[in-house]
């Protein structure tokens, strides 16, 4: 019997190593999830750590819980206005794109590995979706900044395409186990899952905001507990009602993140930290689950499938899904390249194992190999490819201010960060001379590495960042004045 003290010690060491690995990855431009997976493999039974772990059910359960919180955190940081501008493109990629990818990879796998059509489609379905944890982690790192709407499109796609992959995987598991079952019987199941998941996510997202604003808890820390329970309730209720829990929690996160509620900033920071903890736990566990010696026999087929997925299946699926979208060729090319596979395919690969499907262990090892190849090749090359296609944007590090605005319930004011761009009409003017709306107040100015307490005589300079407190209705006017889009400035 392993003592609790030893378990705590090993857990602490692994978490600390994962944190150090994330620091290294940001400096070297290597995706953190790759280092987390490698760290898990090194800690496993065939690595120096020697930790025995081969329980697919526990790994799957942890992965589902972790993904729920990762998707919720991703939804919290997704801006509704940005979502609206890329919504139909993202929905096309997350539905038609996933289906086309599954068909292409499934057909290729059946051809080169001599599998049946349903077996090939099962493998294709498992690797068909991009991974939210991988995409959020890489696109929100300090090494990647993209022009235009490509970045929100990729994030929304990765957050919304898991339901389709889960549905296809479970559906083809049934078809493999029951060869006589018609494919069309899966259609009503898909419609039910999407409809119920969307309805539950939206409704519980709205309910959570209402409860947060009205419950008036004495201890601020209990609001964190409240949102954790909201995530669990959303996923659990949707799943029990035969809906898709992943879609539900992601949509609930979007609804909550785009609403006004008390302690919003502290709750966003909490769920960001919780999402990182979930990523570390999930990737370490999946790394522990794999046996490196089992990957060598599948290396040849794994490379063939990974290459076909990255260079044929994903690009074809993207260009067909975005055929009528108003996007340039190079933008579609970048979307095609950022088809990162991560934890989701590995977790989905545990479903055949638990269902007792023939060749399930082969699927798992192939999927793990494909994920490693995808993250290693695509994840590390995204900045280079974006630069090559002319879509790399200058990285603007997020300034940390020594104060924050915590709005009260139903407040009409908000505080925004505005940067004085080159050529701005407010540059070179004293604050007292600006034609601000009456509600607007410059609270703090960030200049290079310093902060200035503004006065009426303070002269604004190009590149200054300002914290401006204003009535929510006046904020767009203030932004236009600073950017020079309003003649009144």
Image: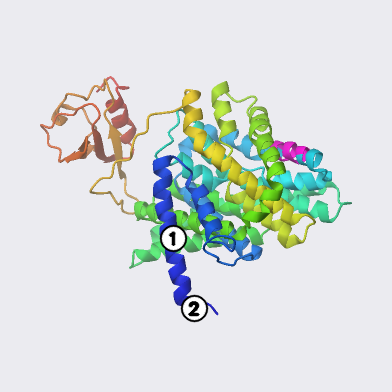
Q: Is 404 left or right of 346, judged from the image as shown?
A: left
Q: Secondary structure at mark 1?
A: helix
Q: Nearer the viewer, residue 188 or 140?
A: 140
Residue 276, placed above or below residue 397: below
Image disc number at residue 483: none
Circle 1: is it few (<14), some (14-19), or many (20+) Cα within 10 Å? some
Q: Which residues are magenta?
A: 100-108
Q: Position of residue 357 (x, y in %)?
A: 78, 57
Residue 183, placed above or below residue 309: below
Identity of the residue drawn at 30% across and 38% down: 417
Q: CA distance from mark 1 to mark 2?
A: 19 Å
Identity of the residue drawn at 38% across and 53% down: 269
Q: Nearer the viewer, residue 345 or 474?
A: 345
Q: Is 342 left or right of 31, judged from the image as shown?
A: right
Image disc number at residue 3: 2
Q: Residue 105 lies in magenta, yes or no?
A: yes
Image disc number at residue 15: 1
Circle 2: is it few (<14), some (14-19), or many (20+) Cα within 10 Å? few
Image quarter of the C terminus = top left
Q: Residue 43 lies in magenta, yes or no?
A: no
Image quarter of the N terminus = bottom right
């Amino acid at each position: 019997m392993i003592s609790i003290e030893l378990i705590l010690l090993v857990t602490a060491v692994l978490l600390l190593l994962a944190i150090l690995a994330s620091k290294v990855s940001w400096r070297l431009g290597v995706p953190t999830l790759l280092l987390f997976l490698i760290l898990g493999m090194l800690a496993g039974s065939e690595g120096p750590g020697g930790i025995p772990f081969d329980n697919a059910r526990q790994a799957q359960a942890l992965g589902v819980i972790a993904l729920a919180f990762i998707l919720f955190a991703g939804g919290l940081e997704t801006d509704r206005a940005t979502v609206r501008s890329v919504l139909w493109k993202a929905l096309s990629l997350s539905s038609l794109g996933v289906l086309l990818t599954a068909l292409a990879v499934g057909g290729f796998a059946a051809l080169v590995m001599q599998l049946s059509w349903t077996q090939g489609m099962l493998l294709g379905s498992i690797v068909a979706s991009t991974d939210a944890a991988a995409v959020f982690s890489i696109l929100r790192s300090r090494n990647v900044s993209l022009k235009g709407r490509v970045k929100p499109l990729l994030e929304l796609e990765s957050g919304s395409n898991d339901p389709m992959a889960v549905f296809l995987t479970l559906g083809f598991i049934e078809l493999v186990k029951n060869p006589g079952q018609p494919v069309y019987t899966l259609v009503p199941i898909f419609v039910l899952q999407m409809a119920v998941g969307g309805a539950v996510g939206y409704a519980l997202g709205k309910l959570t905001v209402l409860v947060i604003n009205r419950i008036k808890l004495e201890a601020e820390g209990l609001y964190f507990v409240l949102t954790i329970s909201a995530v669990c309730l959303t996923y659990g209720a949707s799943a029990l009602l035969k809906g898709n829990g992943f879609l539900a929690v992601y949509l609930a996160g979007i609804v909550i993140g785009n609403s006004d509620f008390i302690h919003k900033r502290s709750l966003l920071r909490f769920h960001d930290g919780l999402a990182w903890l979930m990523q570390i736990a999930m990737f370490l566990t999946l790394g522990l689950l794999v046996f490196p010696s089992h990957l060598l026999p599948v290396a040849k087929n794994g490379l063939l499938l990974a290459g076909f997925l990255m260079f044929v299946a994903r690009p074809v699926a993207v260009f067909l899904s975005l055929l009528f979208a108003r996007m340039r060729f190079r933008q579609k090319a970048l979307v095609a390249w950022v088809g990162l596979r991560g934890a989701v395919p590995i977790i989905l690969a545990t479903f055949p194992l638990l269902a007792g499907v023939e060749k399930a262990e082969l699927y798992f090892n192939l999927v793990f190999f494909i994920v490693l190849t995808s993250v290693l090749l695509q994840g590390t090359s995204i900045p280079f490819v974006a630069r090559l296609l002319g879509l790399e944007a200058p990285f603007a590090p997020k300034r940390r201010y020594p104060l924050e605005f915590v709005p009260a319930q139903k407040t009409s004011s908000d505080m925004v960060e505005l940067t004085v761009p080159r050529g701005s009409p407010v540059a070179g003017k004293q604050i007292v001379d600006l034609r601000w709306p009456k509600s607007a107040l410059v609270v703090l100015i960030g200049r290079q590495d310093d902060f200035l307490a503004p006065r009426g005589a303070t002269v604004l300079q190009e590149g200054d960042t300002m914290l401006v407190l204003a009535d929510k209705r006046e904020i767009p006017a203030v932004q236009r004045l600073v950017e020079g889009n309003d003649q009144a400035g």
